[in-house]
Amino acid sequence: MSAKILSGTEIAKEIRAELQVEVAELKEKHGIVPGLVTILVGEDPASQSYVSAKNKTAHALGIHSEQVTLDVETSEEDLLALVTKYNKDDKINGILVQLPLPKHINEGKVLFAIDPAKDVDGFHPVNVGKMMLGEQCFLPCTPHGILEILKRSGVETSGAEVVVVGRSNIVGKPIANLMLQKREAGNATVTLCHTRTKNMDAHLKRADIIIAAVGVANMIKANQVKEGVVVIDVGVNRVGVSESGKAILAGDVDFEGVKEKAAAITPVPGGVGPMTITMLMKNTVQAARQAKGI
Ligand code: GUN
């Protein structure tokens, strides 16, 4: 069996078309243009490319976007002052500080400084707490994108054995929490595996759905998964550079091998990546609506 390819690119296109209509309507009927600011500290090439993709997408959808790039030596105090400035700026509905931040800056302190009403990343403790309780809030973009892929591809999650590999605050912890909730793409039995997990193979082997978010290229192999599994690969690992100078990417899952056994699988690139950016746009539009009480 060769797996159905769950194209994040195609699903993202669908959602972006919906958002484009929504943004045009907001402008026409209410005179509202949603606004997003991205803040990048330093020159990490991967972060630069993510941030520029976020701004490009915003622009294409008619969302006002501002991109601030700060020197790697920027002080925590100056970054906090910038966040405070955007908290008060009515043109800006969403503030995104690209992670990771340089070591001398306390990430938590910066994320906590963002107004929760503008926290389109869903990283502020107020939003994390609301998410955990199943309350209306900004969902973190990558887990939100995974839920949309599962939902729009008709993957049955209710009662499914879901194994999440990786316990990051950005992906592993939130997706595990969301998928066990009573919600669309939820109601699953969730196991969260990490570096100290004993007998990882036994967990992977009984999974109906695997969500891999570890950051190790091609780590999960065909002999570790069961026939008919659904695989969501969150990994974006740079494994080389093409002749034209572009980064060659690989997921956390050995795509070529696993696709022969899986029922469905997301590719890398073209899987979860485009969904993350799209859900950021969706959150920004949601923030603009909420700011005006619409
Ligand atoms: N770095 C990697 N993923 C993300 C993300 O979703 N948001 C932010 N702000 N930084 C990231």
Image (cartoon, rainbow, N blue to C red):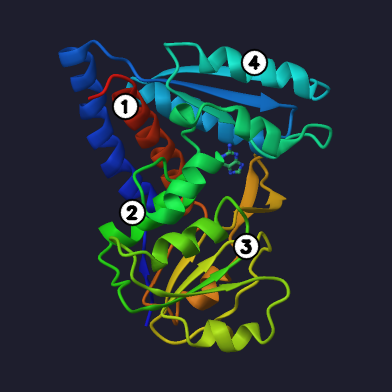
Of the residues under marks 4 and 2, which one precedes in the sequence?
4
Q: Are marks 4 and 1 in contact (CB under 8 Å)?
A: no
Q: Which mark is residue 290?
A: 1
Which SS class for mark 4? helix
Q: How far separated are the C-alphas under marks 3 and 4?
A: 30 Å
* Camera-side mark, 4 or 1: 1
Is residue 122 visible in the rendered structure shown here?
A: no
Q: From the image, tell me which residue sits under label 2.
A: 148
Which amino acid type is marked by label 3?
Answer: Arg
Counting residues from the N terminus, which is met first, the one under dot 3 or under dot 4?
A: 4
Image marks 2 and 1: residues in contact by CB distance under 8 Å: no
Q: Residue 283, position in %: x, y? A: 38, 35
Q: Quadrant of the N terminus?
A: bottom left
Residue lying at 28% horizontally and 62% vertically, measured from the top left:
153
How far across and how far down the image is residue 59, in percent?
Answer: 40, 21
Viewer-nearest of discs 2 and 3: 3
How far, Cα to Cα, is label 2 from label 3? 20 Å
Q: CA distance from mark 1 to mark 3?
A: 31 Å
Mark 4: which amino acid?
Leu
Q: Amino acid at mark 1?
A: Gln
Q: Please tell me which residue is depicted at 31% across the width and 27% down the height of the picture.
A: 290
Mark closer to the chain start, 2 or 3: 2
Give me the disc on residue 167: 3
Rendered residue at 48%/11% (across/down) = 89
Q: Is residue 71 left or right of residue 276?
A: right
Residue 14 drawn above or below residue 92: below
